[in-house]
């Protein structure tokens, strides 16, 4: 945990240093409503025991501080510190257990999956004016804050998305976008299970110059 805190402080300090640069900086808040598209089955014990009939109907979201640093008129670098909730409801199945449980056996339960995320993204502008249109792509580092299933404490996600923005008053910018996120590293012992999420997000940013 100490290493995670040091890493967060390091990135945060870099964001502050960026704002002292002559290049344009946008700094603000992001909120995303996330739709989980992951598998309906997750093996957690042995080769076949795990959670089935997984339902991703919880209100999951990603929210936090975000910053954009302009490299050129066509390219921005994005980073920040975000809190992400990826809970689901599943029913545990134990095909190899010797104990026979009364019908219906295990009951559906809420599985909490909470992360602290640090994205490193590139934003390429197709249109860059008061109204802008861009493609966003890169990596998202996820550090476990809370997880009911004890597995890895880190997951790396790939991100790709499309974003529109508008400078509605001087130095203030609103942005709407959608993205697709998929895990690139194994988080659970089940190598067939990957995080797959589609997010619809809103950002409000202030220009620092």
Image (cartoon, rainbow, N blue to C red):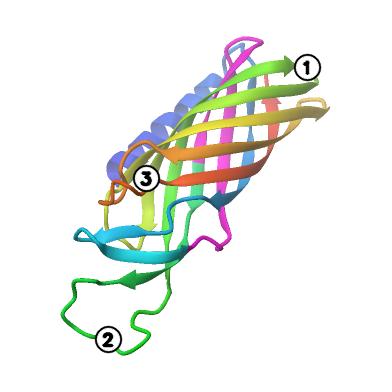
> Could you say whether the residue bearing mark 3 is in a helix, strand or loop?
strand
| Residue at mark 3 | 143
Q: Position of residue 157 (x, y in %)?
A: 42, 37
* Residue identifier under label 2: 101
Q: Reply yes or no: does residue 61 show up in magenta.
A: yes
Q: Is residue 37 magenta?
A: no
From the image, tell me which residue sits under label 1. Answer: 129
SS class, disc 2: loop
209, 84: nearer the viewer: 84
Seen in the picture, residue 115 relative to 127 is either above or below; the reply is: below
Q: Between marks 3 and 1, how big is the CA–CA gap?
A: 36 Å
What is the quadrant of residue 173 in the picture? Answer: top right
Of tags 1 and 2, the one toward the viewer is 2
Q: Residue visible at 66% across and 23% down? A: 134
What span is in magenta? 55-81
Instruction: Give above or below for 176 relative to 90.
Output: above
Q: Earlier in the sequence, mark 1 or mark 2?
A: 2
Q: Tag 1's secondary structure?
A: loop
Q: Give the prevailing secondary structure in the magenta stretch.
A: strand
Q: CA distance from mark 3 to mark 2?
A: 36 Å
Nearer the observer, disc 3 or disc 2? Answer: 2
């Amino acid at each position: 945990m100490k290493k995670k805190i040091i890493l967060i402080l390091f990135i945060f300090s870099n964001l502050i240093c960026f704002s002292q640069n002559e290049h344009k900086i946008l700094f603000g808040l992001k909120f995303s409503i996330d739709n989980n598209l992951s598998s309906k089955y997750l093996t957690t014990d042995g080769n076949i025991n795990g959670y089935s009939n997984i339902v991703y109907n919880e209100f999951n979201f990603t929210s936090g501080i975000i910053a954009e640093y302009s490299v050129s008129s066509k390219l921005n670098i994005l980073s920040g510190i975000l809190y992400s909730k990826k809970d689901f409801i599943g029913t545990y199945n134990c095909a190899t257990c010797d104990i026979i449980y009364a019908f219906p056996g295990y009951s559906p339960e809420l599985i909490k999956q909470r992360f602290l995320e640090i994205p490193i993204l590139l934003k390429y502008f197709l249109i860059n004016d008061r109204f802008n249109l861009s493609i966003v792509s890169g990596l998202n580092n996820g550090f476990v804050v809370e997880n009911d299933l004890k597995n890895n404490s880190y997951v790396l996600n790939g991100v790709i998305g499309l974003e529109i923005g508008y400078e509605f008053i001087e130095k203030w910018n609103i942005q709407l976008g959608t993205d697709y996120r998929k895990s690139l590293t194994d988080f659970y012992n089940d190598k067939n299970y990957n995080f797959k999420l589609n997010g619809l997000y809103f950002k409000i940013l202030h220009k620092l110059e």
